[in-house]
Image (cartoon, grey):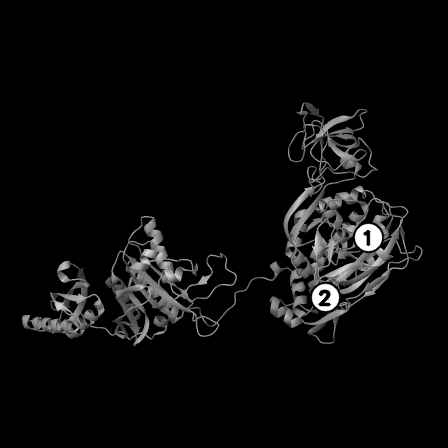
Amino acid sequence: MRVVLSWLREFAPFDDDVDALATAMTRLGMEVSGVERVGEPVPGVVVARVVETRRHPQGERVHEVFVDAGRGEPLHVWCGAFNMQAGDLVPLATLGTTMPDGRTIERRKILGAPSEGMLCSARELGLGEDAAGILVLPPEVEVGADLFGALGITPDAVFDLDITRNRPDAYGHLGVARDVAAHLGLPFRVPEPTVRADGPARSAPVEIADPDMCGRFVSAVLSGVRVGPAAGWMQTRLAQAGMRPINNVVDVSNYVMLELNEPNHAYDLARLGGGGFRIRRARNGETLVTLDDVERHFTPADLLICDAQDRAIGIAGVMGGADTEIGPSTTEVALEMAWFDPVAVASTAGRLGLRSEASARFERGRDPYGIDRAVLRFAELLAETCPDLVVHDGLVDARGELPPRERSTPVRIAAVNRLLGTSLGVEDVRRLLDPIAFTVTETGSEDVVDVALPSWRPDATVEVDVIEEVARHFGYEALGKTVPKSTIHGHLSAEQLRRRLVRDVLAGVGVSEAMPNPFLAPGDLERAGLDGRFLEIANPLVAEERVLRTSLRPGMVRTVAYNESHRNAGVALYEVGHVYPPGDGELPDEREDLCVVLAGREAPAAVEVWQEVTAALGLDDRCGLQATEAAGLHPTRTAVVTLDGTAVGHVGEIDPGVLAAFDVEERVAVLDVSLTALLVAEPAVRTLRPVSRFPSSDIDLAFVLDDRVPAAVLTDALGSAAGDLLVDLSLFDVYRGEALGSDRRSLAYRLRLQAPDRTLTDAEVGEVRARCIAAAEQAGGALR
């Protein structure tokens, strides 16, 4: 919201220290996002009268304007705006004038004819934001006079405030001035209107058909209206506040709204059917052409303002209709000010996509009891340009379901100090609250006071709202800073520590972390050879990625494919993430998984990674491998991973068909396990073993094994046969060839034997070798 300093001064004597005022506003929660200096005189800009406008046959975007600047002969000016006509007074920047943006006005030829100056918009002169057309001036200013002197414009400041929804009162200059004056300790007053409704009795009757949506509707009849430009000072203020001046009636309506936060609407009484109003819910499919010339369609959830003949003439709290708008022939006005249900206004404005200055105020809640002053203020301002204005006696005040005017809440001083960390007393609280009309009354208790809640603050309802007002005016910066203390120090849980350990182990074996998209496209699961059952997201960010993944494998294989397509072969990646396989009920069986992919590697490489992870977690003695077939994995190079006999995942290779579907040419070893199961498992207690001082002996053995038998089966058999003398067992070679036969491979192991108390003899080593060969043959291997 744009707030003009000179406008604020009508309520309190604010000084010229703009920076101090901006700081005070921000401290009070009305953040100042910018301060604009306006009204600085621009020497060389004068008042000119339009003598004639003429279209040029070759000028599509400009036309010729002849103006009288008081020099006795018309000046020729080219202009790109078409909103003026003969007789209008407009600002003319004469030749040699330096504009606020740094431009210097020079004689320029356009279409062969020179331009003797420039006609100016409000923005070009720094008088407002409107740049849609040339600024049309009031008729009373003198032709040839300096523009700023003729309009009485003096340097001013405009604050651009970011008003939060819980401060509806700050949507008017009155509310901002009240708050800032109280904070700075300045006297504050609201001038009383000087006019009264004392004309001949005449009224515009009101019927409220739906009192739950319209709590109050006030109508007043004004005659003697002459539609024309508003006073110059009003046009200037409206322009500075971001409003485009239109005519005196509309401008006064906008001025009262910006000043008192009282949205209102003026209807041409001659075009008001039956001369009165009826407020009701819309009928399904009912339509109305609003002031923006758009036909709107309504439902029974919308509230309409109708004339006495039940014809819709406006959307309550949002926008009026085009049929009853003020025009040049208007002489009598039916003024309307009302209070509508905020939720109903917000619902209608949102459904129609029609946000207006009025709806912004109504939907945040406004004062239903400030209407009486606003009606008289409207008449007072309009009388400046309508000297014969009559405000007729017979003001109609129809009531529906209205919030109570008198509200209060008990406030505990101890609660104030507990929440704010202060040591305030009753008098301190009174000093802070009374100036903003949160009147404090003692209750007889030393710790509890009763605080009246003003009607213009519907957001304040309970004790904590009042405490917030105390904090605002005491000053958040004065509250100080305290660090909460706790007897419990922050730490990572056991599961968090073990998860970090898994990441460290994987980084140690050369595997990098990947973070694929957690959402899949329909068909990704089928391409990965997985069950097509899945859950869909109701409102996905991307329509093509609406499937909740049931496995990490599709995303990891797609990552391998991406790297391979960019000539980055042989990647080793892992992901820790959540998967969402469908459950028996409405919710998925969500869990955290670990998936490792090793491009260009075979299944034993993934087994080695699995062994490193289980060893680090202290679960190696409780984990096992068993040959199996699994969806999406190689049928003869896959094993199920078990923990205490329960399957927790798979290790092996990705099925060649899946790799082909993702355009991956390398073999890909994979480890896909439930990390949730691993993290909650209790690790084994580690025992220290003394380091032997005696030499070790190595045995190399190679066995031919069917592809359907996992290497882990042979590894376990060798380890068990070697017994306590075994200190290391490693698979150092895998060989396939025609001599071995199809679907067979050779696995070469190195066994390191060492005794803790002696040097092993050849006989002891030979005995262990013989036991290992026999165990391997029982496991399905043949010594090569």
Whether residue 170 is visible: no
Residue 464 horizontal/vertical position (percent)? 65, 68
Residue 735 horizontal/vertical position (percent)? 17, 60
What amino acid does circle 1 point to? Tyr
Q: Nearer the viewer, residue 520 or 7?
A: 520
Which residue in the protein does label 2 denote?
Answer: 430
Vertical arrangement, residue 627 with respect to residue 180, above or below: below
- Is residue 483 left or right of 717 when viewed as pictured? right
Task: State the SS at label 2.
Answer: helix
Write the residue at 36% across / 52% down: 562
Indicate the quadrant containing the C terminus: top left, top right, bottom left or bottom right.
bottom left
Which residue in the protein does label 1 denote?
Answer: 267
**Label 1 – label 2 distance at C-alpha:** 44 Å
Residue 496's disc number: none
Residue 500 horizontal/vertical position (percent)? 36, 65
Which of the marked residues, 1 or 2, is nearer the chain's N terminus? 1
Numbered disc total:
2
Whether residue 321 is visible: yes
- Is residue 72 left or right of 639 when viewed as pictured? right
What amino acid does circle 2 point to? Arg
Report which quarter residue 213 is drawn in. bottom right
Vertical arrangement, residue 155 with respect to residue 555, above or below: above
